[in-house]
Image: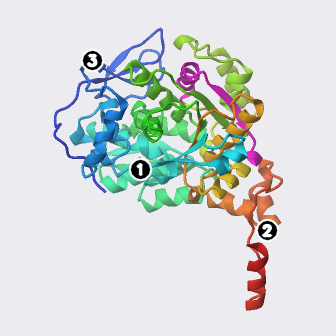
């Protein structure tokens, strides 16, 4: 693993700056400063560029030439291979651990389950990243900026994947120390083990992710620690490259739909930014539609967008329905509760950016129960891709949208699988187990009543004849 990618460009770039997303503010700030919100209005920030001075290729297929430069760590990275489309740092400052070597797989087996014509459903498998989730795409960008700013500590609140990714980058590069905030009982052992093994300082507080997010922002401000949650705009610059790799895998053709789980809403926000910029450069002439899928037990976006009519409104988001719903959650002590722990979030920090994404990509929002998520996860597994429960929300959502007729069977659909199966093996084992007590303890409280696609172990006596009979019977 390499600390930095060595390349010819050793001078600090001045192409990038930070800009407030509020249409009535649009304040700008130097890229070489650390901030996660606008000083003037408190809104979220984008990383913007002086594209007139950037070396943007004339066509997307020009990026194919960089495959021949894979001995260069910059071009080996599935994020920095597209450096010309996120040029906020010079090449000799880029941090990489080989992220982004991910796969877009067309699968008729899962497509049959969703209800798609053959050849039309694709899975973008981000579980192949070094830490096992999509977070590495953004973390390499955030740690790059943190290193440029001279940060000695970096912090995050996490349901697991962000903490694993931050801990990995800090351990592998030795550039800074990772400080991780997790809620009590709100992280899977698969993810927690990574943070502990990579040497991060792990702080477990009494509360859930939303509580941890509040505290980490306070602590980062008080102690001057670099914050890497997706409220950090540099994180989203890295995550937008997932869409570049999707297009690359499709021969630079635009799919009809991108379907993605909705947690803190960083991915949906980043994906839209990718397509906005590609359209601005004239590199594409259309954009796919976006579907963001909440878990039923953590459906703030669905509630606000589909039920309360909250919209981007050209950058002037009406806040009253959002404030009212947040007050309702506080008043009624509503906590996110889903087996899909990676998206178990009630107050998504990138809500406004996601509203912009839905506006630009003619998007829809849906919520699916844990039962549907785990059934979809089992079918994804049958198709050869082990994913954590949150990932399966995308396939469960695509199936719902297909049933509603929103997605046509002939549409080309890309479902993003955000994390590896071993991130949360307890949910997988509980779904497939024949032990009813284990099933009920792990899944029953989430409204999961059956395992329609369970692949249960076959118990046989330790006798050769019995073993042979069982194999002949079940295979």
Query: Mark 1 or mark 2, which has the lower sequence index?
Result: 1
Q: Which residues are magenta?
A: 350-372
Can residue 417 be seen at all in this image of the molecule? no
Q: Position of residue 339 (x, y in %)?
A: 69, 49
Which one is nearer the viewer's eye here, 156 or 280?
A: 280
Give neighbour class at mark 1: few <14, some 14-19, many 20+ (Cα, 10 Å): some
| Alpha-carbon span between mark 2 and mark 3 | 62 Å
- Res 34 quadrant in image: top left
Q: Mark 2 highlights which residue? A: 434
Which one is nearer the viewer's eye here, 217 or 24?
A: 24
- Quadrant holding the C terminus: bottom right
- Quadrant holding the N terminus: bottom left
Task: Check the image and report above or below for 450 versus 55.
Answer: below
Give neighbour class at mark 3: few <14, some 14-19, many 20+ (Cα, 10 Å): few
Task: Check the image and report above or below for 446 versus 32.
Answer: below
Q: Mark 3 highlights which residue? A: 52
Query: Mark 3 or mark 1, which has the lower sequence index?
Result: 3
Task: Check the image and report above or below for 443 versus 317.
Answer: below
Task: Identify the element where label 1 is drawn.
Answer: loop
Q: Position of residue 8 (x, y in %)?
A: 16, 40
Query: Mark 2 or mark 3, which has the lower sequence index?
Result: 3
Indicate yes or no whether the magenta region holds residue 359: yes
Task: Identify the element where label 2 is drawn.
Answer: loop
- Res 17 quadrant in image: top left
Q: Mark 1 highlights which residue? A: 101
């Amino acid at each position: 693993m390499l600390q930095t990618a060595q390349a010819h460009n050793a001078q600090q770039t001045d192409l990038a700056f930070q800009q407030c997303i509020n249409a009535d503010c649009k304040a700008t700030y130097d890229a070489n400063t650390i901030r996660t919100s606008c000083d003037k209005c408190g809104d979220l920030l984008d990383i913007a560029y002086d594209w007139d001075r950037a070396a943007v290729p004339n066509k997307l297929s020009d990026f194919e030439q960089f495959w021949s430069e894979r001995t260069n760590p910059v071009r080996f990275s599935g994020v920095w291979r597209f450096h010309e489309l996120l040029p906020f740092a010079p090449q000799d400052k880029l941090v990489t651990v080989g992220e982004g070597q991910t796969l877009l797989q067309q699968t008729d087996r899962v497509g049959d389950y969703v209800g798609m014509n053959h050849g039309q459903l694709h899975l973008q498998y981000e579980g192949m990243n070094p830490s096992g989730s999509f977070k590495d795409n953004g973390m390499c960008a955030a740690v790059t900026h943190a290193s440029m700013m001279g940060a000695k500590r970096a912090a995050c609140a996490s349901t697991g994947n962000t903490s694993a990714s931050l801990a990995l980058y800090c351990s592998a590069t030795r550039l800074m120390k990772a400080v991780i905030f997790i809620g009590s009982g709100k992280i899977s052992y698969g993810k927690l083990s990574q943070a502990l093994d990579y040497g991060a300082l792990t702080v477990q507080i009494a509360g859930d992710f939303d509580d941890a997010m509040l505290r980490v922002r306070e602590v980062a401000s008080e102690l001057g620690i670099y914050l890497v949650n997706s409220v950090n705009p540099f994180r989203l610059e890295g995550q937008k490259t997932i869409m570049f790799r999707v297009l690359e895998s499709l021969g630079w053709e635009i799919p009809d739909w991108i379907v993605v789980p909705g947690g803190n809403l960083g991915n949906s926000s980043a994906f839209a930014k990718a397509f906005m910029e590609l359209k601005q450069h004239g590199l594409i002439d259309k954009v796919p539609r976006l579907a963001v899928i909440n878990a039923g037990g953590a459906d703030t976006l669905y509630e606000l967008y589909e039920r309360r009519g909250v919209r981007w409104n050209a950058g002037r988001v009406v806040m009253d329905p959002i404030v009212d719903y947040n007050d309702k959650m506080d008043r009624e002590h509503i906590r996110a509760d889903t087996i899909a722990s990676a998206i178990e979030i009630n107050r998504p920090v990138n809500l406004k950016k996601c509203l912009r994404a839905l506006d630009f990509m003619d998007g829809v929002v849906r919520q699916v129960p844990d039962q549907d998520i785990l059934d979809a996860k089992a079918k994804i597994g049958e198709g050869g891709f082990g994913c954590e429960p949150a990932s399966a929300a995308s396939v469960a959502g695509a199936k719902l949208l297909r049933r509603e007729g929103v997605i046509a069977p002939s549409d080309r659909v890309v479902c993003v699988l955000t994390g590896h199966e071993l991130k949360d093996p307890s949910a997988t084992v509980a779904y497939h187990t024949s032990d009813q007590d284990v099933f009920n303890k792990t899944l029953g409280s989430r409204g999961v009543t059956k395992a329609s696609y369970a692949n249960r172990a076959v118990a046989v006596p330790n006798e050769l004849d019995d073993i042979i009979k069982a194999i002949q019977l079940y295979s």
